[in-house]
Amino acid sequence: MIQAAITSLMDVCDAAGMIRTDIGPTAIGAALEGIALTSASAEHRQQAERLLDLTLDGFTVRS
């Protein structure tokens, strides 16, 4: 279900020209899983937010 949700979001972002086309849903899922595993506890919330910002920035199309 998560993979299907990621794919749907990627399709919308791709149609809008907002996401890189060389990244697949599996890569995004793995990145999100890694963030969750390394920042699962409450005291790591800021780290998780920063890692998520960095990851999402990396998926964005550069102009």
Image: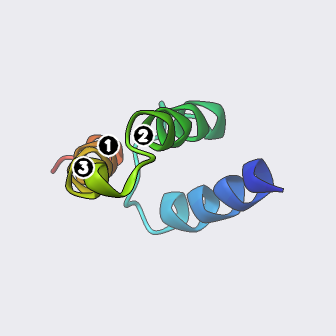
At a point 28% along the width and 40% down the height, the residue shown is: 58
Tell me whether circle 2 and circle 1 mark residues in contact (CB < 8 Å). yes
The quarter of the image holding the N terminus is bottom right
Instruction: Of the two numbered discs 3 and 2 on the same chain, state the one appearing first in sequence.
Output: 2
Where does residue 20 sit, x and y in percent of width and height? Answer: 40, 43
Judge left or right: residue 29 versus residue 46.
right
Amino acid type of the residue that numbered disc 3 sits on in the rendered structure: Asp
Q: Which mark is residue 55?
A: 1
Q: Nearer the viewer, residue 49 or 56?
A: 49
Which residue is identified by label 3? Answer: 57
Which residue is identified by label 2? Answer: 35
The residues bearing labels 3 and 1 have C-alpha atoms spaced at a distance of 5 Å
At a point 27% along the width and 44% down the height, the residue shown is: 51
Q: Nearer the viewer, residue 61 or 36?
A: 36
The residues bearing labels 3 and 2 have C-alpha atoms spaced at a distance of 14 Å
Instruction: Tell which tag, 3 or 2, sits nearer the viewer.
Output: 2
At a point 49% along the width and 43% down the height, the residue shown is: 36
